Image: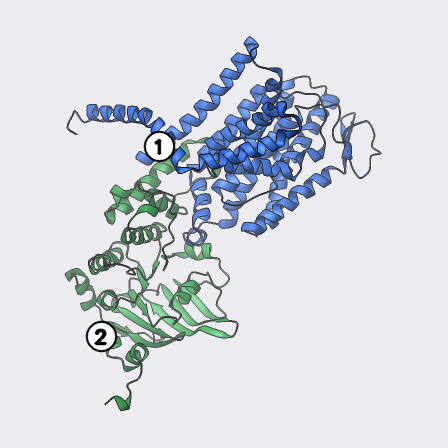
Chain colours: A blue, B green
Amino acid sequence: MRAKRKKLIYNAVTFGLVIAAFLICQYMISTGQMTRSLRNQLIPICCWIVMAVSLNLVVGISGELSLGHAGFMSVGAFTGIVVSGWLLNAFQMEDVTLRLVLAMAAGGLLAGVAGVLIGIPVLRLKGDYLAIVTLAFGEIIRNVMDCVYVSVEGQGLYFGFLNNKLPGTLLLNGPNGAVGVKKIATFTAGFILIIIALVVILNLINSRSGRAIMAIRDARIAAESVGINITKYRMMAFVTSAIMAGMAGALYGLNYSTLVASKFKFDQSINVLVFVVLGGIGNTLGAVIAATALTVLPEMLRDFGQYRMLVYAVLLIVIMLTTNNPTIRTFLDRLIAPVKRLFRKKNAAELLKQTGGDAQ
Amino acid sequence: MSEQVKKHRAGTKMVPVPTNAIVPERDVDEIPVLETRHLGIEFGGLKAVDDFNLTIGKTEIAGLIGPNGAGKTTVFNLLTKVYEPTTGAVLINGKDLHGMSIVQASKLGIARTFQNIRLFDKMTVEENVRIGLHNQIKYDMFSGILRLPRYWKQEKRQHEKAMELLDIFGMQDLADEVSGSLPYGVQRRLEIVRALATDPKLLLLDEPAAGMNPHETEELMENIAKIRDRFQIAILLIEHDMSLVMGVCEGICVLNFGRVIAKGTADEIQANPVVIEAYLGKKKEAAK
């Protein structure tokens, strides 16, 4: 029961923190205490949290290093933009919420399809080779996106590859990306997406499929010998992760009026990986906190002007070093200890009550 | 040696069957759980295992022994489809394993433990056994994520079954421990429990007594006999500890340089000059 309770507490803390943060943000927005620059950051923060949580499924839970995560995000982003634009232009769908939901669903779906297509060849590899190939696929997606033209006329969508002579209004304009996108992303949608991502990941970990995925990570041959289909479960983790990245991408894309494919370069994949590593590989709550902190940080460092990224890098190194320093860790543990003891005492008291005081 | 184990061996009479293989008398009318025919594998011209013929009765406890490098673990890897044999065939309950994957072989009823323990060491003891139950108690990914009624029902069944298995080996109190932190002997036992969770017909144990003290080995012997009696399955074990092999195994097969050099009961093997030569070397005339 002890292990089970620990997991329950971990999940409760994760959800509690996210919900509390959302409520605080909402309160600050309504009272006007939030600065404009931070308010503009809210939706991207949600997107990066979902990206970090979903990459954590591949890197932390499934144990594969994937460096092409931004690729799935871009698939989702451009799909979302196209679907949203198409629904608006072809069907005059004015309902923003419904359009956003459909756009995100489509973004997730297409990113999932991309995940399957890429997963089939890529998941034959492991370790460094997998990392290299996913990196390449991420770049391929970005370059393909540079050549895609999509336009809408009447109720029809027109696709062109390296061919911009399409009828109607252009939704995607090749290397110029998407222009004139109606911004329909909302903070609430971002919050709901985070909750969905957390539910999927945390429930998956504590289920048969999740245990199979972790078994493959810990001892591949042993997992196979007890009858776990390695390909199926690696694929499951990879595609689930891609779907969530696609949904986050759709939200991200619909938060800007213009979007170009070069926004999803290789360094974005690395960025997401940094969130995961800083949060502690396999630690979902850590990924959420790290993604938030590291998205806000560069904005707060704007005062440093051109030295911004330098300071960011130094801070990142300092954080990584201090959180791994045993002295500091024991110091932090000692700080938390009284709180933990409080809980333990309570539990012991409850136990005593249940057993009628026999435990003494 | 415990009385129980002794009784098993004493009561077993080995009888010849038409294929010149030997199985316990009580299993003679049943389809043998394992049959290998001229099994062999080459690694770049080196014949690691050659013309390996072995038949194991439905409830036999069999031993596979031989000097280091004789190819014993290679045989296990052939039986579990880690390697595809270059020649010959493996039949499990009369079904040919040709072209099957490790997973398919596991579904047919082969389970194994490893020479160097391979537990899921970041997970708890119970989770390890639950993973063993992967193909026994099923539900799909969506029931898991959405926590549908099926999830709760099957999780409960998994928990009960896992605890039942752990209970048999006196490990129910360790269910919540992280498996990597357990003592060596307990880890070995857990590996056996995990293998048993897959509901095998044939259990392969690769050096189960390695690193154990005599007391633990004694306990292991009792457990091996217990497994056979309770689950009515066959067990094939590789072991260097002769007290265990001679104590618990009914049929013994001796391997040297990838070839079977002797087969028989414990007493026959102990008296076999070829086996003695393989282990101790040839008697030199000059030594007189």
Which one is in front in this view, the residue at disc 1 or the one at disc 2? Answer: 1
Q: Mark 1 and mark 2, same subunit?
A: no
Which residue is disc 2 drawn over?
Answer: B267
Image quadrant assignment for residue B176: top left
Which residue is disc 1 drawn over?
Answer: A6
The percent coordinates of residue B27 (x first, y second) are: 28, 66
Query: Residue flagged by tag 1: what amino acid is it?
Result: Lys
State if disc 2 and disc 1 touch (CB < 8 Å): no
User: Is B241 located above or below residue B275 in the figure?
Assistant: above
The chain containing the residue under callout 1 comes to: A
User: Is B192 located above or below residue A104 in the figure?
Assistant: below
> Image point 35% across, 47% down: which residue?
B180
- Assign a secondary structure to mark 1: helix
- Considering every residue shown, the one lying at the far right of the view is A165
Q: Quadrant of the C terminus of chain B?
A: bottom left
User: Is B213 located above or below residue A93 in the figure?
Assistant: below
Tell whether A330 sits left or right of A291.
Answer: left
> Image point 58% across, 31% down: which residue?
A312
**Residue B33 visible in the snapshot:** yes
Image quadrant assignment for residue B220: bottom left
**Residue B143 visible in the snapshot:** no
Q: CA distance from mark 1 to mark 2?
A: 54 Å
The chain containing the residue under callout 2 comes to: B
The percent coordinates of residue B131 (x first, y second) are: 39, 46
* Dot label at residue B118: none
